[in-house]
Image: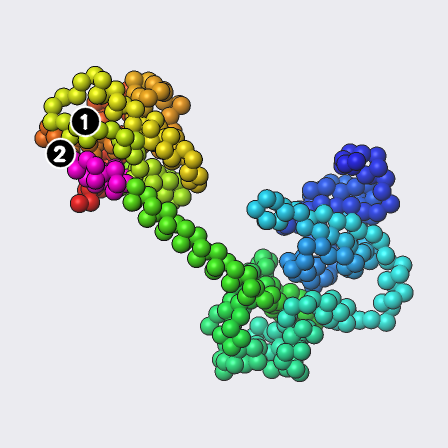
């Protein structure tokens, strides 16, 4: 049974419940949680409830590398700024892209037990205990002299006793501060956020994800905390994945160009037509602010938009005279034939639909479906303008090519009738102001 946040059971649970955004903003709490900290609203940031900034940072750091975190103990403030010890159990909730959506967890008051345990422990030993729980290499350094003030057990196992030595000398073998040192970034703003960056260690030949933050030291000064998580395996996987994507993209490009060339070989009068239409379409889309991913899909559609003509007899394609009605109706079928040819290929873009619609007009006078403006894909509208321009300025067996000024005048004449006005204006702009030219 799913327990909703307004359920009696949810609010009467004898333990605190919370859900927070990755930035610490409270999403949901139950009655026990609110009573524990005397909270009346959800405006309080969860991270700010920690008495110790170091404990807050350690908790966040551990969550960085664990799906669940149980038994974490820390001191929290109530609304009246009274402190109490709590035990927190937390887990990540991710979306379908494996990104952190929010955190959920439980919290309970363990003040009585902790008070008896920690009577004789100082604040500094509390800090070291928390930091030594972290399984990743971690150190704290003086930003002025670059000396190491603390290294946790994970790093001490690798370096030995290095307290007091220069961080750049011990960690990287440099005689002077590292050129990639983040002190300036971390300390330029007293309320700076956590700095997360990836670094390749030349000595170890490993990738690390570094988490840097300015934190207060027990003597009152600000010091730099840095934790390094080994992400070498993830980086290698990422590189291999990107290489695979690149190879797949190259294969797709080669296949598309081969198909495009195959169509144009059958009709020497339109040699290069699809490539030039794709070139102009992409230039228009780029000027209109389309994303590169969307432009890539439009380019593929441009390279294949006349693939349906492959079924037409060469006698029709090469005919030096005006076509009969029957012959023209056969040509008008080529968008639908192209759609059927590509319908079973799973492109990451609606390539087949763009090809199906590239002869539609916004007033409904186009073919094959007679669609009107709102029902036509924007990519198909761009392709229609580019196709018209390129066809008019190219040689055909039944006519000489038109001048570019005549072609531009044609789309201007039918703006808002056959062609989308914004696309027409953009096309005119790139020809007249940006001096667009077709590639030979």
In this view, the residue farthest toward the left is 400
Relative placement, left or right, of 334 versus 59 is: left
Residue 238 showing in the rendered view:
yes
Q: Position of residue 404 (x, y in %)?
A: 15, 33
* Labels 2 and 1: the sequence-earlier one: 1
Residue appearing at x 72%, y 70% in the figure: 132
Q: Secondary structure at mark 2?
A: loop
How far apart in space, not on screen, are marks 2 and 1 (Cα)? 16 Å
Q: Are marks 2 and 1 in contact (CB under 8 Å)?
A: no
Is 165 placed above or below 126 here? Answer: below
Q: Nearer the viewer, mark 2 or mark 1?
A: 1
Residue appearing at x 87%, y 45% in the figure: 14
Is 73 placed above or below 356 here? Answer: below
265 is within the stretch colored magenta: yes
Most common SS among magenta residues: helix
Q: Secondary structure at mark 1?
A: helix
Relative placement, left or right, of 439 versus 225 is: left
* Residues drawn in magenta: 260-278
| Residue linked to disc 2 | 395
| Residue linked to disc 1 | 316
Relative placement, left or right, of 400 versus 2 is: left
Q: Position of residue 357 (x, y in %)?
A: 34, 27
Relative placement, left or right, of 116 versus 288 is: right
Residue appearing at x 38%, y 35% in the figure: 342
In front: 256, or 87?
256
Q: Quadrant of the C terminus?
A: top left
Classify mark 1: residues with Cα within 10 Å, few (<14), some (14-19) or many (20+): some
Q: Quadrant of the N terminus?
A: top right
Classify mark 2: residues with Cα within 10 Å, few (<14), some (14-19) or many (20+): some
Is 263 placed above or below 215 here? Answer: above
């Amino acid at each position: 049974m799913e327990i909703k946040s307004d359920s009696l059971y949810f609010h009467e649970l004898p333990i605190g419940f919370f859900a927070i955004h990755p930035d610490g903003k409270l999403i949901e709490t139950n009655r026990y949680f609110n009573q524990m900290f005397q909270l009346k609203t959800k405006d309080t940031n969860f991270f700010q409830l920690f008495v110790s900034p170091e404990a807050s940072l350690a908790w966040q750091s551990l969550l960085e590398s664990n799906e669940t975190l149980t038994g974490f103990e820390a001191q929290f403030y109530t609304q009246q700024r009274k402190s109490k010890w709590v035990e927190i159990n937390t887990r990540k909730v991710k979306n379908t892209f494996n990104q952190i959506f929010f955190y959920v967890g439980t919290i309970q008051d363990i003040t009585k037990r902790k008070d008896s345990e920690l009577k004789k422990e100082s604040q500094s030993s509390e800090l070291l205990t928390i930091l030594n729980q972290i399984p990743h290499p971690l150190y704290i350094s003086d930003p002025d002299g670059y000396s190491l003030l603390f290294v946790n057990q994970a790093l001490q196992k690798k370096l030995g006793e290095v307290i007091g030595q220069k961080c750049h000398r011990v960690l990287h073998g440099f005689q002077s501060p590292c050129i990639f040192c983040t002190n300036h970034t971390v300390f330029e703003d007293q309320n700076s956020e956590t700095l997360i960056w990836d670094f390749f260690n030349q000595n170890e030949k490993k990738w690390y994800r570094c988490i840097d933050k300015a934190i207060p030291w027990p003597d009152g000064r600000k010091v730099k905390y840095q934790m390094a998580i080994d992400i070498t395996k993830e980086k290698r996987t990422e590189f291999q994945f990107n290489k695979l994507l690149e190879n797949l993209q190259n294969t797709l490009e080669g296949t598309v160009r081969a198909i495009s060339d195959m169509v144009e070989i059958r009709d020497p009068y339109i040699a290069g037509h699809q490539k030039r239409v794709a070139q102009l379409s992409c230039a228009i889309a780029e000027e209109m602010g389309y994303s590169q991913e969307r432009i890539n899909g439009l380019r593929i559609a441009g390279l294949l938009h006349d693939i349906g003509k492959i079924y037409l007899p060469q006698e029709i394609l090469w005919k030096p005279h005006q076509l009969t009605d029957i012959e023209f109706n056969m040509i008008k079928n080529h968008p639908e034939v192209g759609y059927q040819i590509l319908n079973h290929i799973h492109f990451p873009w609606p390539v087949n639909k763009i090809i199906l619609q590239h002869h539609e007009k916004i007033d409904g006078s186009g073919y094959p479906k007679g669609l009107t403006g709102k029902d036509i894909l924007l990519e198909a509208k761009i392709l229609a303008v580019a196709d018209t321009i390129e066809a008019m300025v190219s040689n055909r067996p039944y006519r000489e090519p038109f001048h570019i000024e005549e072609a531009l005048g044609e789309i201007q004449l039918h703006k808002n009738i056959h062609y989308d006005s914004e696309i027409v204006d953009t096309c005119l702009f790139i020809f007249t102001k940006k001096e667009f030219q077709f590639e030979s």
